Image: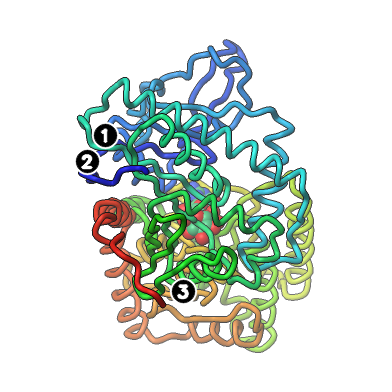
Amino acid sequence: SVSRSACNSKGSMIVVSNRLPFILKRNDKTGELERKASAGGLVTAVAPVVIRGGGIWVGWPGMHLDDPNEKIPESNPNDKTPTAGLLSEKIVPIYAEPKLFDSYYNGCCNGTFWPLFHSMPDRATFIADHWKAYIKCNEEFAEKTVHALHLLKQQKGKNGNAPPIVWVHDYHLMLAANWIRQRVEEDDIKCKLAFFLHIPFPPWDIFRLFPWSDEVLQGILGCDMVGFHITDYCLNFIDCCQRNLGCRVDRKNLLVELGGRTICVRPLPIGVPFDRFVQLAQNAKPVLSNANQQVILGVDRLDYTKGLVHRLKAFERLLERYPEHIEKVVLLQISVPSRTDVKEYQDLKEEMDQLVGRINGRFTTPNWSPIRYIYGCVGQDELAAFYRDAAVALVTPLRDGMNLVAKEFVACQINTPPGVLIVSPFAGAGEMMHEALICNPYELDDAAEVTHRALIMPEDERIVRMNHLRRREQLNDVDSWMKAFLKAMDSLEEEADDIGAT
Ligand code: GDG
């Protein structure tokens, strides 16, 4: 079996994710490939660990490559992002036939797993061809990961003989681990396998709607360690393993047994690069000019899980119920275009456009409009200024794995008096950010009421709440998430002792 002996986090790391930590583009003039950096918190935390250990990143480069001999470019000399040091020899790109990749990505990943895992089964499609494409693409990712493991073996890494950690990410790649395990056993390569899910893992009653749910569980259970944001998702997963596959499980120690192996399940709540956001907030110029208006801020991908329609309706209810806020309060909603070639998302865009128009039409006065709606992306500096200067942040998804916006908002709250965070209990973030105001986005009256409470909250209460929130997020930032993951990998041997019956 895959050996866990003499393992520690000094082993090189192979990250396997749907997307590489940058995208490739072809230069219009020269025809050459170029890297375009991305700067998400996850990449910022993980890339340095990969680079330091001489590890490898496996993923899709954001465009279809057809010549496997074409060299992946090095980073641009001006690139200051964390992936700049990731040499081209440390990148293994995925080549996939465009139609197949579309069925896998838009079909199965975003048309099936995304809504289903967010407990919205009515939005999910169950199409055998999409599932077949998902299997094929996962095989391809697994194949390329095994190739990466061979490369590491040749290069001997900077880490001598410590077995590498293979870390598979997210709902796009739930089958890959099992194939990787089978192949490394055949090829006699030692490694430790881990999986992390960035979205919720649903309760069994929802999960079992997926016609091939056993295969999904078996795929994930190919790992030695499976991580979720919060304990609820761990318990949902364990429940599914027991009820679907008949596995022996230990709910107290979060263990699952399958085929003589013990798999550790762990809550690993992700954090944000707290200090970086503080810095951004310190340096960003003010962008919200009218000091007489309180700004309620929303920042989301335009996705039906984020509860945007409910949010606008709750804001309308607030203006109806508490007319004292008219001309005093503005909802600034930033909606980042997302998955724009999926119909559900095009429909949502339509609905939002109409709703914004209707509410603004209803309440606008000659000097004021209640909603400012940005359909697009804003720069990091501007975003930090919005976070810093907003009076209230509305983070009210219907369901969300964690939600980083809530955490970035509190990181940027460097001014006194601070603003107020409102968070949905159906986001992973709602589970831990106890000093935020909690609001059920489905109950419009309550959402309006809670928003009103936030707007009139006394200064001293705001300060106490925000201090607690900030302290927790600073302590549990994205680097500490990375460390917690490595520590969990280190302690696998101890945990995997005999499983107790439950
Ligand atoms: C998935 C899970 C989980 C947004 N607008 C702009 C912008 N953003 C950045 C935010 C934040 C990120 O995008 C969004 O992260 P979320 O966590 O809110 O949501 P998902 O994209 O759905 O992420 C989620 C996460 O994975 C991590 O595990 O928390 O639950 O669904 O970082 O700052 N950034 C810039 N301009 C924008 O307009 N620059």
Q: CA distance from mark 1 to mark 3?
A: 35 Å
Residue behind mark 1: 53
> Of circles 2 and 1, which is in front?
2
Q: Is residue 282 visible?
A: no
Residue behind mark 2: 10
Q: Secondary structure at mark 2?
A: loop
Measured along the vertical axis of the image, is residue 278 above or below residue 307? above
Question: Which residue shows up at 70% across the image and 69% down it?
Answer: 309
In primary-sequence order, the first of circles 1 and 3 is 1
> Of circles 3 and 2, which is in front?
2
Question: Which residue shows up at 24% across the image and 45% down it?
Answer: 5
3 and 2 marks in contact (CB < 8 Å): no
Measured along the vertical axis of the image, is residue 12 above or below residue 287? above
Task: Give the left or right position of residue 234, taking residue 354 as reference.
Answer: left
In the rendered image, the quadrant that contains the N terminus is top left
Identity of the amino acid at label 3? Answer: Gly
Q: CA distance from mark 3 to mark 2?
A: 34 Å
In primary-sequence order, the first of circles 2 and 1 is 2
2 and 1 marks in contact (CB < 8 Å): yes
* Residue 171 point in image, percent of width and height: 56, 51
Q: Secondary structure at mark 1?
A: loop
In primary-sequence order, the first of circles 3 and 2 is 2
* Residue 300 point in image, percent of width and height: 57, 58
Label 3, residues with CA under 10 Å away: few <14, some 14-19, many ≥20:
many
Identity of the amino acid at label 1? Answer: Gly
| Image disc number at residue 191 | none
* Residue 103 point in image, percent of width and height: 72, 41
Question: Which residue shows up at 54% across the image and 67% down it?
Answer: 246
Q: Nearer the viewer, residue 490 or 435?
A: 490
Residue behind mark 3: 430
Q: Nearer the viewer, residue 267 or 435?
A: 267
Q: Secondary structure at mark 3?
A: helix
